[in-house]
Image: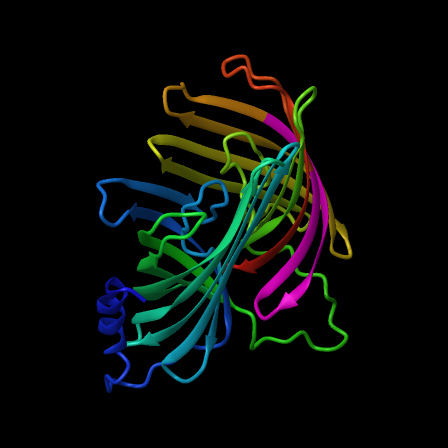
Amino acid sequence: MTNRFVAPLAALALLAPLQLAAQQWGPTALGLQGGFTYFKYPGTKFFDSELHLPGFSDGTPLPTPPSLYLIVPVSGRLALEPSITLGLLGSVGFWNTHFQLGLRGDYLVTSTFYGAIGGILVREGYGNGVTNTSGYNLGAQAGLGARFHLTGVIDGRAEAQVQFWGKTRTGVAQNAYSLMLGFTAPVSGRRNPAGVQTRPPHRGVRLGIAGGLSDQRVPGGVDQLQLSLPGAGTQGPNFVSPPAFFVAVPLTDRLTLEPGLELHRTHFNGFTLATGALATHLNLGLGGGWYGGTGLVEVARKSTRKPMTGATGLSVQGGYEFRLAGAWNGRLELSHIILAKQRAGHDQPLSVTSLMVGATVPLN
């Protein structure tokens, strides 16, 4: 470990012996986070940045903080936080993989503020069938944050985080400074009694997260296959998949409106790409946890030296909802998105078939 690792980690380590009023993390909780990351390359004047709301990155070699995480209490003020991000993108003659696993200790200084220290393991690979490169990188992470109650069983947090990465065959040495926003809900502490209907209720507003497998087809073009956990949505320059974050708003006992929103911006090697998407689904409950529906998808993109372009499409989807764990309900969804040819950006028509695994938690 180089000297630049020592100072921030040692400073946070001093938080452990502080004798403060006893605090509690509560039950084990699942969370999703996203935010802004600034990358600085030691010994150079170069920098890059990424913004992901929600957070996910498999399109560049810039290691943003992992997106999905668990808070696992160990004692009153100490918790372990494992985290994960998984991505795979493949097409004819090209592939890209990204696996990121983090583990850190979170220590409550007060009932609101906490410090964190840990490490992150990343495995990245890419190739074109002729030249293939892959490798591992181990980094250190530290953070200072504040947690707060949002509503119902959902807690939020805001965190300043730093990561330190050494040079490898797949990447240069870099420091990453992040401002992250996240939310959590318990996956323990609430059990489903025997004999109770496992179909989750359709009443009440729910937050949802999703990820899975998407197959994008372009007539006369190159098909692409993407696996992402959580979902990558429209992060890439030429890919569209269902948003990783959505809100389910019941309109009647059987009818539910599901808006999904995401925003991404990557500045890498002098090139900037910004993408955003808004998906609006209308789902009809069919009974027994099954549902089906249709919706609209709006995608916008802007890159260096190119004008902003937009694309509007239609979607159909169907799935099954079930009780998962704690405050969370799970669901499996099969969807199909069709985007027409766009004259402004000369984008070809495309269709995307996705199998998504999701989870929802009630706001109240």
Q: Is residue 24 visible?
A: yes
Magenta-drawn stretch contains 331 = yes
Q: Position of residue 93 (x, y in %)?
A: 63, 33
Q: Residue at x 63, y 76 (%)?
A: 191
Q: Residue at x 40, y 19 (%)?
A: 306
User: Which region shows up in magenta?
Assistant: 313-335
Q: Residue at x 25, y 85 (%)?
A: 17
For this rendering, which residue is in front, 35 or 189?
35
For this rendering, which residue is in front, 276 or 319?
276
Q: Position of residue 46 (x, y in %)?
A: 26, 40
Residue 72, placed above or below residue 298 = below
Q: Residue at x 58, y 57 (%)?
A: 360
| Quarter occupied by residue 281 | top right
**Of all residues shown, which one is farthest toward the front?**
130
Residue 135, placed above or below residue 27 = above
Q: Position of residue 37 (x, y in %)?
A: 33, 48
The overriding secondary structure of the stretch rendered in magenta is strand
Q: Quadrant of the N terminus?
A: bottom left
In this rendering, would 138 be left or right of 221? left
| Quarter occupied by residue 26 | bottom left
| Quarter occupied by residue 8 | bottom left
